[in-house]
Image: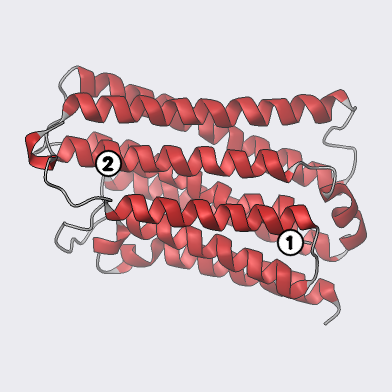
Amino acid sequence: MNPRSEHRPMPRPCTLVYLVMLLLTLLTWLIGKTGITGLPVALGVLLLALLKGQLVGDWFMGLRGVRGLWRWAVILWLAIPGALISVAFYLSSGA
Amino acid sequence: MNSRQPDRRYPPGDLAIWIFILAELSVFAIFFAAYAFTRMNNVELFNEFQQSLDPTSAMLNTIALITSSYFVVRALAAIREDNREGCESWLWAACAMGGVFLAIKSAEYAHHFGMGINLSTNTFYMFYISLTFFHFMHVILGMVILAAVAVKTRQGAYSADEHTGVETGGSYWHMVDLVWLILFPLVYVMR
């Protein structure tokens, strides 16, 4: 253990983010196991995935501390496919 | 993790890897959209054969990749504190979790291929095998990169002042994790 890390407040923010992502993953799995279907459920599951992706971009990839165009790299990557997938599932649901 | 760093203009690591990451993410985005729009005309087929997949294996694989990404974050935090041994240990731990992912996914492939399922079985399996195998290859490449960074860390190539290599390798690995986070619900859960 490096002396500079001995008095660090625990848990680290990254540890909290990691635990939140584990919980969201288990929630997604539970929904899959129960076999619940339908547009609201599918879009809810997608929303959980997009939230996890945003956490990875911000806290793990370090984009939270970046300004300018690069700050938007992961946000846009999540938003564009997320929107396309949502539209496709909406249209196929017959809603 | 950059929570304690001041605002910066560019993301962590070599800018070239970020160009590569954006290119890779774009390819996967096209794959995801293609899956969703192809499913529009084959909803019953996709829903039926999606149920042949094991969401528990996919959940365990998601946990493996999230955990490995967390370990990479810890490796970066360690080297920023000039803790080279810690950094190397976290990187090898991340590689090990990548190995767990490959083992689980290989077992899934063995199960499906053993049942005679292949790319031409139907449209759903074509997407399932293509998407997941493309990602599988990225996991292997990511593990090679992490292992190379771990070896260089042992050789003393990185320090608290200079650790661009750790950031570069870590950014690629997080991209591999990021892609799976969307792939998991899209292919295994959403219907």
Chain bearing mark 1: B
Q: Residue at x 11, y 37 (%)?
A: B160
Question: Is B89 located above or below residue B183 in the figure?
Answer: above
| Up-down relation of residue B110 to residue A13 (above or below) | above
Q: How far across and down, in percent of the image, does residue B47 sit?
A: 86, 56
Q: Chain of mark 2?
A: B
Say what secondary structure mark 2 lies in: helix
Left or right of B99 on screen, residue B34: right
| Left or right of residue A9, residue B20 in this image | right
Q: Can the viewer see residue B75 in this picture?
A: yes
The colour scheme is secondary structure
Horizontal side of B103 relative to B115 (left or right) equals left
Q: Is residue A61 visible?
A: no
For badge 2, the amino acid type reads Glu
Q: Residue at x 52, y 69 (%)?
A: A79
Residue position for label 2: B167
Please, what secondary structure does the residue beneath circle 1 have? helix
In the image, residue A75 sits, relative to residue B132, either above or below, namely below
User: Where is residue B49 drawn, in percent x and y?
Assistant: 87, 48
Q: Are marks 2 and 1 on the same chain?
A: yes
B134 and B102: which is toward the camera: B102
Chain-order first, disc 2 or disc 1: 1
Q: Which of the two residues, A35 or A67, is positioned nearer the viewer here? A: A35
